[in-house]
């Protein structure tokens, strides 16, 4: 969420929900956050790198790829499938 | 090239440019800068190796148009009028350039799309959109947005 909050152009948005997880031996279930969607709108992105710097888990990094141009500016909003294709 | 600058009163704006033109200075451009209550107006005049800037402050009163002596100032005056929401006297063509919000270069004017767009950082991790999880938690605001600007 830090990347979402710190982005100066508000180009990152994410959706998540909470799930209850019980390990054997736990007295009560723990809740964990599950990522549903992560989108960076490269039509707004300034390439400032604040999101990369601020992530405490180093989940974002710079890559040399160019953003594929599209016919509609909505095609510039890339989700998890485009951002992390090897997953 | 030596750069010189001169701060003048708004009432002398046109007359000072007239004397500059008589001295052979040509007009380069005119721009503005947000000064809070007032707007700084700057014009650049050049002649050979002379680089002279004239500046003034407009605090609600109209800016005198330079188009009678420097026709090239036309577009820049239209731009400043629209971007800083000032009036320029002595001109008949007051068509806006972009036709959207006036005064967007002033910090006091908040951009309409910003006000209408919900801030994606308002949601907490694991939040399905409900604030029921922890309603007493301090509401964060986006960086750089002034207090009371109306964002969640």
Image: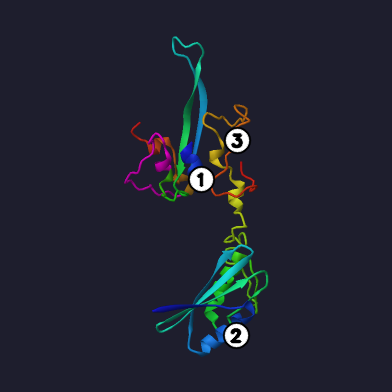
Question: Which numbered dot is residue B116?
Answer: none
Residue A52: within the magenta?
yes
Q: Is residue A23 magenta?
A: no
Residues rendered magenta in the picture: A51-72
Task: Report x, y in % for residue A79.
Answer: 44, 38
Tell me how far mark 2 sits from mark 3, CA to CA.
56 Å
Cα distance in 3D space between marks 1 and 3: 20 Å
Q: Quadrant of residue B2?
A: bottom left
Mark 2 Cα-neighbour bin, 10 Å: few <14, some 14–19, many ≥20: some
Subunit ID for the residue under disc 1: A
Query: Does residue B65 sit above or below B110 in this rendering?
Result: below
Q: Is residue B131 left or right of residue B25?
A: right
Q: CA distance from mark 1 to mark 2?
A: 47 Å
Query: Which of the pair B4/B120 is nearer the observer?
Result: B4
User: To which chain does the residue with label 2 belong?
Assistant: B
| Furthest residue in direction top, as rendered | A25
The picture quadrant where one finds residue A25 is top left
Q: Secondary structure at mark 1?
A: loop
Residue depth check, mark 1 versus mark 2: number of the one nearer the observer: 2
Residue, disc 1: A10
Please tell me which residue lies in front, B72 or B139.
B139
Residue A72 shows in the view:
no
A51 above or below B125? below
For marks 2 and 3 on the same chain, the one whose residue lies earlier in the sequence: 2
Decide: few, some or many residues near mark 1? Use Cα within 10 Å; few <14, some 14-19, many ≥20.
Answer: many
Residue lying at 55% horizontally and 30% vertically, measured from the top left: B127
Q: Which mark is residue B138?
A: 3
Nearest the camera: A77 or A11? Answer: A11
Quadrant in the picture for the C terminus of chain A: top left
Which residue is situated farthest in the left direction here?
A64
> In the rendered image, which residue does mark 2 sit on?
B15
Judge left or right: residue B123 versus residue B50: right
């Amino acid at each position: 969420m830090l990347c979402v909050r710190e982005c100066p152009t508000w180009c990152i948005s994410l959706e998540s929900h909470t799930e209850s997880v019980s390990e054997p031996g736990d007295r009560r279930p723990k809740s964990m956050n599950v990522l549903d969607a992560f989108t960076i709108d490269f039509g707004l992105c300034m390439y400032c790198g604040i999101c990369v710097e601020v992530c405490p888990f180093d989940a974002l990094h710079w890559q040399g790829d160019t953003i594929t141009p599209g016919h509609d500016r909505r095609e510039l909003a890339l989700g998890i499938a485009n951002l992390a294709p090897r997953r | 090239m030596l750069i010189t600058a001169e701060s003048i009163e708004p009432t002398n704006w046109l007359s000072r440019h007239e004397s500059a033109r008589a001295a052979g200075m040509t007009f380069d451009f005119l721009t503005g800068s947000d000064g809070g209550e007032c707007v700084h107006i700057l014009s650049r005049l050049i002649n050979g190796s002379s680089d002279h800037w004239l500046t003034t402050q407009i605090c609600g009163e109209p800016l005198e148009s330079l188009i009678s002596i420097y026709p090239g100032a036309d577009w820049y005056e239209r731009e400043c009028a629209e971007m800083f929401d000032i009036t320029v006297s002595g001109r008949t063509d007051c068509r806006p350039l972009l036709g959207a919000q006036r005064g967007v270069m002033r910090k006091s004017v908040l951009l309409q799309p910003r006000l209408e767009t919900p801030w994606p950082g308002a949601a907490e991790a694991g939040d399905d959109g409900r604030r029921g999880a922890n309603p007493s938690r301090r509401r964060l605001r986006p960086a750089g947005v002034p207090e009371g600007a109306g964002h969640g």
